[in-house]
Amino acid sequence: MSGFFQVYREYLPEWWPRLLEAARVTAELSSFGFLLALVLAGVLVAMARSPWRALRWASNAIVQFVRAVPLLALLLALYFGLPAFGLTLSGYWAGILGLGLQGAAYVAEVLRGGLDSVHRGQREAALAAGLTPRQVFANVVLPQALRVMLPPLVNCYVSLLKDSSLCALIATDELMLAARAMSSEYFLPLHIFVLVGLFYFAIAFPLSMLSRLLGRRLSRGRRALGMT
Amino acid sequence: MPAALPVILLTLLEGAVTAAQVALGAALIAFVLGLALALVDVFSRFALLRTAIGAYVEWMRNVPALAHLFVLYFGLASIGLRFSPKGAAIVGLGLVGAAVLCDVFGAGMRALHVGQREAALACGLSPLQALRFIVLPQMLRLTLPAIGNYASQLIKDTSIASAIAAPEIMFYARNLVTSTFQTPLIYASAVLLYASIVFPVSWAFNRMERRLGVGR
């Protein structure tokens, strides 16, 4: 067992900078992917709430379809398939696009659930009190919806972070690909993949805890109301 | 050489058989181990055991499945424990799924009122009978939506087994691409194939939920 850790003591100085650099790319992939997912999800939710049935139907169809497709298939299709239509993306951008598309379907569900959780009466009362629809949304509905949305949104980010590991398979220089390269260099796959797992864990676990904490914190007031 | 669509579909279907084997094998491990862990976590008096289960669940859930597969397939091989690609995929996805379902089942059992079990014991049922006839059926009904989500997620996750060369759908798709260069057609077929497996499964779960009146 001590031999196992001895390896780390010996190689960590060499591995650390490379993994840190790769972790930066992983953080970028998942963060930009998440931002794109938020924007696209906003569009999907706006479509789902539009008065036109065709838009509502399209929004639902897109969400259902994307949720039924593995991210890896999406990434390979974007990276290898798009060049046939004259659009060549680097692994980095194909990864962000794929993560954004996939994430959008899940984030859209969260946003929709959050908005639906605000009682209709809130909106009606605010309108009756003379607020404009825009004010109603920004000052009444959204703040209340956010407390429901925030914890699952953090979970969505954690999922995206883990899913960004698949970008290794479209040649993006992130943690997983760096690990694969290093494992064929040093022939210490167990040490390297466990270490890389720790890198993901070090980002994902605190966020998961934060999500749980937020869930308890933000629902405190609500629950008290519900129980009376 | 360009391949005709039927050839592409037949090849991908061959991969679908492997994907189904991986999914079923992993689901079996996930269900049995997940339930066992959840039972220990909920009912055990040993704090150390509960902490260990918590650590297992957090590790499995906060690290990408791909990393787990690489540890199993490449990592363990380096210390002499060799898995076949399919075997590593089944065990890897099964262990991840066990953590997911442990969370789900645990939450489901905690959501039941204590009185359910106490009443069952007071009626003269043995603890095992109370579990079998009172707690588990209600817990499963309560957690059916989450189990359905897990099932469709698992089917999609079988795709990452291609990264350790398990011959499933994406593996064949990539092979076909390198031999025929009909990239868009092949990946579109693969995407549709996944959708046509996932949709019926989630439809079946939705139907079961309605049947059992989940969420009433």
Image (cartoon, grey):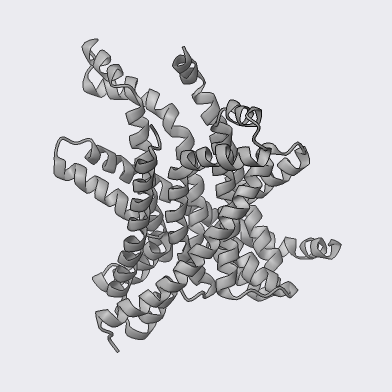
Residue at image location 28% in from the left, 17% down from the top: A121
* A8 relative to B106 in the view: left or right: right
Residue at image location 40% in from the left, 60% down from the top: A70
* A188 relative to A142 in the view: left or right: right
Where residue A79 appears, x then y in whole percent? Answer: 37, 67
- Residue A168 in view: no
- Does B37 appear above or below B197? above
Quarter of the image for residue A132 reads: top left
Residue at image location 49% in from the left, 24% down from the top: A219
Of residues B26 and B119, the one drawn nearer to the viewer in this rendering: B119
- Does B141 appear above or below A72? above
Quarter holding the N terminus of chain A is bottom right
- Does A221 appear above or below A188? above
Of residues B108 and A74, the one drawn nearer to the viewer in this rendering: B108
Which residue is outermost to the right? A2
Where residue A19 appears, x then y in whole percent? Answer: 62, 60
Where residue B123 appears, x then y in whole percent? Answer: 62, 29
* B115 relative to B81 in the view: left or right: left
- Residue B203 in view: yes
